[in-house]
């Protein structure tokens, strides 16, 4: 067998695509290492889309290659259960040594065996003192104030060594220790670093905090509510109470976020330098991508939402550096990709056959050829049915629902509204974005003339034919992906049922053998053939 590549997945949380400076969309963005990587050693996908705009459903999707609707992984509190495999469990079964940090948002905490099924080694952390907090005392202010639900904390303090040593820093250092330590049995290594940043709160220490030029930030667009917006955006805006925010306030929040992304870039550089120092960088397939984006002031909103699909939330960074020997033409690809394609590409590069039906498409061809076709459309989905209280985040911690002191109260409280949190699905082509809403008006945007999605043209007669095509495409997509039948067959007969069929031919002492055949799921036809041979004097120990 040819030497298999090491697989490295670096996964910051809530990072928008335009946080990458090399995409040229945000002059204030600073990601020098990622920019250099895309220029010479990797491919960066400008239009890569998550399959759900919040953490858990997105991760359950990209780690299985399946869409959230396939097995109901569309909430923050339903994760991969014992019968479900993942990229990690499959690589582990194929001989990889799988390392991950505990904060991964795809394995259920109540299952004591979950981590052991998907990883050989888990870093839990908790051995370092907490990093210093914000310089501002009480950065939230009082209830009703403009910052109470803004998530903006500002500049962080540093310790006596001039550092703010965060949980993410601990994760990167733990990964570097693993890289420097020989893997048992000389197995190929699979590493998953699930970082917290740039997830809120928006905060950063020096030198990152002051490195961002506030004057270079692009204008917010749209800066306020959009006519006909989804009800949940209206409710979240009312709950967040940030109407007193000035443009200077928004610039500070967005600069903090950009500073966090700059630190993520530096942490990724440290990891790659460690791979080089260990002499294995060339043998690594490295994936840098995020699970979803962030509003960052779009329409006067902070944070994220589970069933809305502006580019700000659903378009994410995706960079792939293949191992040496895999053809590569580096640079930016403008076609459409989905995060389920990460699963397919990892399995392709690792040479491991998936153990379940998936819907990802390997990006290997596009790594080698900028003209290689990508997807005709990308999809994302979220929300719930009316009455599905178990699917809203507000009631996840108790029947009384979320409490007002919770920093995420506006978003979680809004999810109690059946209409606002209704099911919705996005289908985005190169030019158009269509959003089907179960309980509200659908949305249709022409991204060529309206890139910020401010004019809903769902009722525009000029786009009636386009709308019909998009609706049919969405129906085709759902029909093609609505379920996934497991590869393993179930037996149709219990041991007693089989014994009832063959006991006329078999002596009683063979009953246990027949029961064992049922447990091994041997088809009945083969059991009957074995019993017939036995009746004619055949060897009872022969294989059925």
Image (cartoon, rainbow, N blue to C red):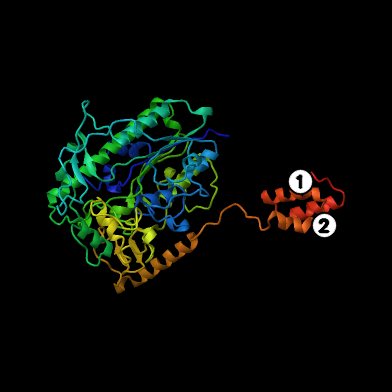
- Seen at 48% across and 59% down, the residue is 481
Q: Which residue is mark 1?
A: 543
Which mark is on residue 504?
A: 2
Q: Quadrant of residue 498?
A: bottom right
Indicate left or right for 537 with 107 as reference.
right
- Seen at 87% across and 52% down, the residue is 536
Query: Considering only vertical position in the picture, is 493 above or below 178?
Result: below
Q: Nearer the viewer, residue 112 or 224?
A: 112
The answer for how far apart the CA atoms under marks 1 and 2 are is: 19 Å
Q: Nearer the viewer, residue 385 or 360?
A: 385
Which quarter of the figure is the N terminus placed in?
A: top right
Which is more N-terminal, label 2 or label 1? 2
Element assignment for label 2: loop
Indicate left or right for 284 with 261 as reference.
right
Question: What crowding class fits label 2: few (fewer than 14 Cα within 10 Å), some (14-19), or many (20 or more)?
Answer: few
Q: Nearer the viewer, residue 87 or 538?
A: 538
């Amino acid at each position: 067998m040819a030497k298999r590549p090491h697989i490295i997945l670096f996964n910051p949380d809530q990072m928008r695509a335009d946080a990458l400076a090399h995409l040229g969309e945000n002059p204030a963005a600073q990601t020098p290492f990622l920019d250099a990587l895309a220029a010479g050693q990797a491919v960066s996908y400008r239009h890569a889309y998550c399959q759900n705009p919040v953490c858990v459903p997105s991760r359950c999707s990209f780690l299985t290659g399946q869409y959230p609707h396939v097995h109901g992984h569309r909430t923050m509190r339903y994760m991969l259960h014992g019968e479900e495999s993942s990229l990690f469990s499959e690589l582990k079964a194929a001989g990889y040594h799988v390392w991950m940090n505990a904060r991964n948002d795809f394995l259920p905490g109540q299952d004591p065996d979950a981590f052991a099924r998907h990883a050989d080694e888990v870093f839990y952390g908790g051995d370092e003192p907490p990093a210093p907090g914000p310089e501002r005392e009480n950065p939230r202010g009082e209830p009703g104030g403009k910052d109470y639900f803004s998530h903006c904390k500002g500049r962080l303090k540093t310790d006596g060594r001039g550092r703010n040593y965060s949980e993410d820093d601990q994760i990167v250092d733990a990964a570097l220790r693993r890289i420097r330590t020989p893997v048992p049995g000389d197995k190929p290594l699979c590493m998953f670093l699930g970082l917290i940043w740039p997830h809120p709160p928006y905060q950063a220490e020096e030198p990152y905090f002051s490195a961002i030029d506030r004057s270079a930030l692009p204008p917010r667009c749209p800066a306020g509510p959009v006519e006909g917006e989804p009800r949940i955006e209206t409710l979240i805006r009312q709950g967040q109470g940030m109407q007193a925010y000035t443009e200077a306030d928004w610039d500070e929040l967005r600069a903090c976020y950009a500073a966090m992304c700059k630190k993520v870039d530096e942490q990724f550089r440290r990891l790659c330098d460690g791979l080089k120092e260990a002499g294995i960088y060339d043998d690594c397939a490295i994936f840098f991508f995020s699970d979803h984006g962030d509003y960052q002031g779009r329409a006067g909103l902070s944070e994220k939402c589970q069933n809305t699909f502006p580019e700000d939330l659903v378009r994410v960074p995706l960079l792939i550096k293949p191992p040496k020997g895999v053809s590569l033409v580096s640079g930016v690809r403008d076609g459409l990709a989905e995060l389920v394609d990460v699963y397919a590409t990892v399995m392709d590069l690792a040479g491991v056959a998936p153990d379940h039906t998936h819907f990802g498409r390997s990006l290997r061809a596009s790594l080698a050829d900028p003209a290689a076709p990508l997807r005709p459309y990308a999809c994302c989905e979220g929300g719930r049915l009316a009455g599905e209280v178990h699917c809203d985040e507000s009631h996840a911690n108790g029947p009384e629902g979320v409490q007002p002191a919770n920093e995420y109260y506006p978003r979680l409280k809004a999810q109690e509204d059946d209409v606002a949190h209704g099911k919705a699905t996005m289908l985005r082509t190169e030019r158009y974005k269509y959003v089907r809403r179960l309980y509200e008006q659908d949305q249709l945007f022409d991204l060529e003339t309206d890139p910020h999605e401010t004019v809903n043209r769902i009722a525009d007669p000029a786009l009636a034919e386009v709308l019909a095509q998009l609706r049919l495409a969405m129906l085709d997509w759902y029909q093609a992906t609505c379920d996934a039948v497991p590869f393993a067959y179930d037996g149709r007969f219990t041991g007693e049922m089989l014994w009832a069929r063959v006991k006329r031919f078999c002596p009683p002492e063979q009953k246990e053998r027949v029961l064992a055949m049922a447990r091994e799921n041997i088809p009945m036809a083969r059991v009957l053939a074995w019993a017939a041979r036995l009746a004619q004097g055949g060897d009872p120990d022969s294989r059925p």
